[in-house]
Image: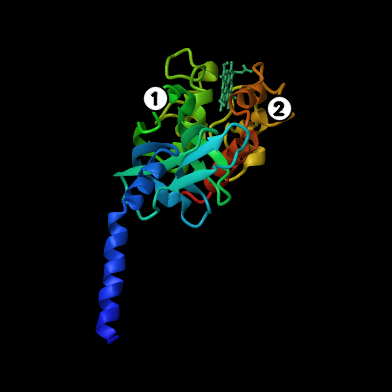
Amino acid sequence: MKPLHYIYILAGIVLSSCDSGDIQEKVYTVDETGRTVKVTARVSGLGDWDGTGFTLAAAAFTQDSKFAILQQAVSSSLADGQEVTLVLSNISSEVQTVELALTNSLRKRIVTLGTVSMADYADNTARDTVRLDMGTVDASRTGILQAGIFDRACIQCHGASGRSAAGLNLTEGHSADALIDVPSTRHEGYLRVESGNPEGSLLHLILREGGENLLSHNHTEILSSQFKSNLEEVSTFIDSWIEQLRETP
Ligand code: HEC
């Protein structure tokens, strides 16, 4: 046979295999193996995490693990305030929550900003996309401290009203000013937060083991009841926030 004939035969094989229908069926099978979750947010403050190994990500967690089994990170090149959509697909049934979370380089959950519980969607078909719309997210260190910790565990007592416990307002826009280098009203000689010195700050002492009796309210218990699976990470995160205040002019 002349070389040209080989080419005709080859072309014939390629064309006929396209007709078989196998390829299309395979595509549909993939679609049905798991759910898709779409997380949208308008994010600012990501620059705080450059070079630290921490990332803001849409992350899927099973019940027993602090490590995301799947995650999609927000690109660090995102412009401040730009909207981003993170898509996690093929989420298996063992996944309990999908979260917008700060994770470390091992995908360990540090602090969570928003959560979808997959059990709430158990009745829907796997093809329905689950959405988590976070609106505007301040992902700076202070923003994550606020949304991930203070809003969740503190503002029910330390709210904005005149009856705020110890006169300490921990709501958004007020918490940093109320804490940083402000003398404690309960323990003379201490600052609520001493810039750059976690171990010397009352905030650190009341949240750590051993600080149970420093205030009339047991704050160690308050923190540990809210953050059962990531208490250590949350405490360390608070300390790292205090630590870096020294660098801020
Ligand atoms: C159940 C209510 C309650 C919750 C929740 C709570 N606190 Fe408090 N907090 C208090 C009360 C009451 C005091 C005053 C304690 C005292 O008189 O000994 C206080 C005092 C403090 C102080 C000392 C203020 C000072 O001037 O010395 C700090 C700091 C503080 N809280 C931080 C927090 C943080 C951070 C959280 C969240 C992790 C939190 N609190 C959650 C009730 C609460």
Q: Quadrant of ligand 1?
A: top right
Whole-percent x and y of residue 197? Answer: 62, 43
- Report crowding for label 2: few under 14, some 14 to 19, many 20 or more residues within 10 A (C-alpha): some
Whole-percent x and y of residue 163? Answer: 48, 12
Vertical comparison of 229 with 217: above or below: below
- Using the rendered image of the protein, determine whether residue 124 is visible from the camera's viewpoint: yes
Q: Residue at x 54, y 42 (%)?
A: 68
Residue pushed farthest front?
A: 1
The residue carrying mark 2 has its beta carbon less than 8 Å from ligand 1: no
The image quadrant that residue 65 belongs to is: top right
- Report crowding for label 1: few under 14, some 14 to 19, many 20 or more residues within 10 A (C-alpha): few
In 3D space, how far apart are the residues under numbered discs 1 and 2 (Cα atoms)? 46 Å
Mark 1 residue element: loop
Whole-percent x and y of residue 186? Answer: 62, 22
What number is the disc on residue 238?
none
In front of the other: 148 or 244: 148
Q: Which quadrant is home to the N terminus?
A: bottom left
Compared across the picture, whether 242 is left or right of 199 comes to left
Q: Give the foreground label among 1 and 2.
A: 1
What amino acid is labelled 1 in the image? Asn
Mark 2 residue element: loop
The residue carrying mark 1 has its beta carbon less than 8 Å from ligand 1: no
Colour mapping: rainbow
- Using the rendered image of the protein, determine whether residue 194 is visible from the camera's viewpoint: no
The image quadrant that residue 43 belongs to is: top left
Q: Residue at x 27, y 71 (%)?
A: 11
Residue denoted by label 2: 211
Which one is earlier in the sequence, the residue at label 1 or at label 2? 1
What amino acid is labelled 2 in the image? Gly
Residue pushed farthest bottom?
A: 2
Residue denoted by label 1: 124
